[in-house]
């Protein structure tokens, strides 16, 4: 998508924000003042002008006016101008992040239609001695393999990895998220126990698919202060990446990606990045080898000094 265009037929689907424990070599976290939200959408749309057509830049600005909180974060911390999803529709993009490949998938069918024997990046990180967790909003039980209400299994990639190791890990570490007040993610934030790599998946309303972009922005506004006030972030041990799974077929799959970390300030990266770059970053954080196409992808870590 550009992560900034929403229409009735091809709505944005928020890939989530990936909560990743970036072990920076910083003795103490930087201190930040208030988020600078004023005119952020206009500044961001203007800055993207050299990377996008005038129509796309205008759409970016218009849509980010509906997401002022995300626009402010992008301006305050870091954002991309040439980060692209790898294909359409949603599911293969999630698989690209989780497995370094689309595995030939070209639809959004459930795991029963697309069992993947390879381990996921989450499994690889666990095998390397790290920790991994998915927090899926509206998911009724751990590692639910079928859509249920506002829970979209197509947005939960761990559920597609079908080896015995993956299934066991998914059953233990792919959990219902809860909400900013209560539940698994809030408990881990408060305890300073966020995983080495993690994925927070909004439901089908809060991801901007079935509801307005302003709803997705409000969801971020509720969750991110909780995350950033937690001991992991305040210690300088956490980076948060907010991205989108795909564009709406109008901008060559260009998607806005925002990186929030104590070591990132007003970074605008023009590096050529994709979801494989994110997969590479997750693997490297967990001490694992990047999977598949992720091994040769542009470096998200280098682009933002993570």
Image (cartoon, grey):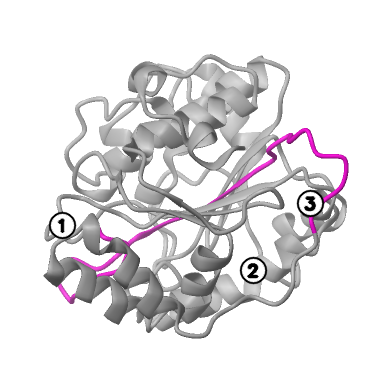
- The quarter of the image holding the N terminus is bottom left
**Residue at left offset 47%, top offset 27%:** 280
Looking at the rendered structure, the secondary structure element under dot 3 is helix
Lower position in the chain sequence, tag 3 or tag 1: 3
Image quadrant where one finds the C terminus: top right
Q: Nearer the viewer, residue 257 or 43?
A: 43
In this view, the mark in front (1 or 2): 1
Specify the principal SS of the magenta part. loop
Q: Position of residue 39 (x, y in %)?
A: 45, 84
Q: Which mark is residue 34?
A: none
Q: Secondary structure at mark 2?
A: helix
**Mark 1 closeness class: few <14, some 14–19, many ≥20 residues within 10 Å:** some
Residue at 60%, 36% in the rendered image: 171
Crowd tier of the residue under label 2, counting other residues whose Cα lies within 10 Å: few below 14, some 14–19, many 20 or above: some
CA gap between label 1 and label 2 equals 29 Å
From the viewer's perspective, is the residue at label 3 or at label 1 nearer? 1
Identify the residue at image location x=14%, y=69%. 54
Residue extent of the magenta highlight:
1-30
Q: Position of residue 34 (x, y in %)?
A: 70, 77
Q: Position of residue 169 (x, y in %)?
A: 61, 28
């Amino acid at each position: 998508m550009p992560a900034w265009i929403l229409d009735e037929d091809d709505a944005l689907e928020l890939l989530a924000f990936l909560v990743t424990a970036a072990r920076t070599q910083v003795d103490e976290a930087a201190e930040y003042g208030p988020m600078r939200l004023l005119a952020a959408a206009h500044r961001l749309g203007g800055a993207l002008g050299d990377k996008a057509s005038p129509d796309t830049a205008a759409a970016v600005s218009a849509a980010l006016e509906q997401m002022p909180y995300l626009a402010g974060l992008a301006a305050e911390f870091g954002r991309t101008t040439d980060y692209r999803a790898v294909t359409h529709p949603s599911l293969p993009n999630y698989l690209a992040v989780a497995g370094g490949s689309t595995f030939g998938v070209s639809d959004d069918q459930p795991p029963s239609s697309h069992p993947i024997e390879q381990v996921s990046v989450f499994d690889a990180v666990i095998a390397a001695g790290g920790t991994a967790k998915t927090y899926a909003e509206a998911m009724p039980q751990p590692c639910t393999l079928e859509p249920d209400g506002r829970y979209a299994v197509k947005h939960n990639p761990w559920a597609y990895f079908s080896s015995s190791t993956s299934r066991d890990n998914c059953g233990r570490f792919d959990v219902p998220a809860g909400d900013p007040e209560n539940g698994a993610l809030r408990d881990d934030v408060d305890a300073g126990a966020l995983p080495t790599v993690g994925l927070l998946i909004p439901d089908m309303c809060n991801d901007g698919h079935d509801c307005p972009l302003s709803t997705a922005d409000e969801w971020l506004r509720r969750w991110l202060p909780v995350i950033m006030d937690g001991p992991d972030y305040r210690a300088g041990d956490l980076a948060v990446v907010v991205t989108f799974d795909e564009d709406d077929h109008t901008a060559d799959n260009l998607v806005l990606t925002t990186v929030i970390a104590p070591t990132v300030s007003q970074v605008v990266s023009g590096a050529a990045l994709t979801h494989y770059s994110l997969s590479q970053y997750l693997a490297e954080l967990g001490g694992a080898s990047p999977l598949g196409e992720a091994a040769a992808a542009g470096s998200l870590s280098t682009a933002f000094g993570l």
